[in-house]
Amino acid sequence: MLDFMERSTIKLMKKRGNTNSEIARALGRDRKTIVRALEEPAEKEQKRPKRGSLVDPYQDRILQWMQEGIPVAVMLDKVRKDPHNPYQGGNSIFYQRVQLLRQEKKMAKQNAVWRFEGLPAEYLQVDWGEKRQFPFTGIPRTTRYCFVGRMKYSRWIYVEFHDNMRYETLIRCILRCLENLGGVPWVLVFDNMKTVVRMIAKRGENGKPVWNRRFRQFASEIGFHPEVCDPGAANQKGTVENGVKFVKGNFLPGRTFRDDADLSIQLAEWLSERNNRKCQAHGHTPNELLPEERKVLAPLTETSESYGLLRLLRVSPESVVRFETNCYSVPEHLIGQIVTVRVASNELRIYHENHLVARHERSFQKKQWFRDLDHYQRTLSVKPRAKVMAYREKLLGLDWPAPPYVAEICRRDRKSMNQQMLELYALWEEHGSERFLEAVRFCHESHAYGSEYVELMLRIPEAELGLGMLEPALSEQPVQSQIDRDLAVYDTYSHR
């Protein structure tokens, strides 16, 4: 059988004037073969006889079983037990043929991929990537997650690395991306991540996504239209994921990082370089096309620092709401009510019926209590003991040396503790934290424990303040050994 090169050689030698016999002798072929090759095209398709398969007699039934959803193992069992023509072939041959029929059926229904370019400021593609054993050299190697936002029109790209993919992390990343972009695009396209669409039912009726309620609220407040990839459309999913692949294939290879700070520095340099490099898709740099997109971007009304994530929380009997294991107070008339909490980067704003009722600095420690005494005026007015303990809690929350000083007063004389706390709290409110803590420091260093000593120091002009000013007041103070030996002496002294 002649191949393409031999047929082409025969035709070329014939054009040069060689006879059929000369060509046959030169190529070692029969003269009749040369004559037949000259009559046929050089690129003649070689048809090979199709070999039959032992599965062929059952093909129609297999296609019917596929429509009925019958498993392949059951199909094999049926054909082996066929009373008229039992299948005699091997299991793997049958399985491979069924798989081939499934692929042919799928390809017959597949539509062509239609690629398109976005309009300026039309699409921002957002996705997460994961990198395990991150190449750190100064800290232990661990997992880092890569947030990628890329504009479809200009190919402008924004990247951040984090140690988690929580909802708040995603929202803050999106807002920082929009801040750097300079506005809000029309559409943000996501992969089917759990923080965007519901975990259980990712597609609702008629194929529509079932949105995460908090994310839907975020999209409405910022002013963009959210879209997610169709799970059955590989081209949509691939387009969104290309940003992550680009980062993994162009930024990470060959690099090491001392720590997260070094990672941020190298990432910023790489982003600046990539956004100023000519893109093969449109022949411009992303930064050259960015002004064109910014002309039609919607204004960004929030920032990553100011935006408050929406939470609905119930007020507990302690008149607090619990968030991330910490407790934040609200006015006590709201006990049992549902309040709206806006969680910003550094503060919590609490609303009831669209009115701001409380504001607290956000704490990232665990199991902390933050109570505003103004929220408990009714309770403190009818419970003197609660008032004393509330004042003591506030004093213990001040900077050093207030905590050890207050603790020592409580330890020395439990009988006068209530009055001491009320007086110290009044002095703090009257003179302010800076002046109050300075007076407490002098008293603490002089071992003068009592609200009367703090009040004495606060009455002395600040320019004359010194340790020596306490000496006359301390001249009658008994030595520590007398106090420890006879508590009655200390009790008499402290009351005086």
Image (tube, rainbow, N blue to C red):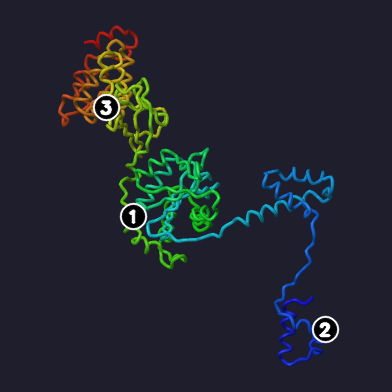
Left or right: where 346 falls relative to 147: left
Secondary structure beneath label 3:
helix
Say which of 220 and 447 sits in front.
220
Measure the alpha-carbon separation of dots 1 and 2: 75 Å
Vertical placement of 3 versus 74: above or below? Answer: below
Q: Residue at x 56, y 58 (%)?
A: 111
- What residue occupies the far bottom of the structure in this picture? 17
Vertical placement of 56 versus 28: above or below? Answer: above
Residue flagged by tag 1: what amino acid is it? Leu
Residue flagged by tag 2: what amino acid is it? Lys
Q: Which residue is mark 2?
A: 32
Measure the alpha-carbon separation of dots 1 and 3: 56 Å
Q: Is residue 239 visible?
A: yes
Secondary structure beneath label 2:
helix
Say which of 189 and 252 sits in front.
189
Q: Position of residue 410 (x, y in %)?
A: 32, 16
Sequence-wise first label, 1 or 3: 1
For disc 3, the neighbor class at 10 Å (few under 14, some 14 to 19, many from 20) is: some
Quarter holding residue 151: bottom left
Q: Which residue is mark 1?
A: 297
Q: Which residue is mark 3?
A: 441
Q: Is residue 255 visible?
A: no
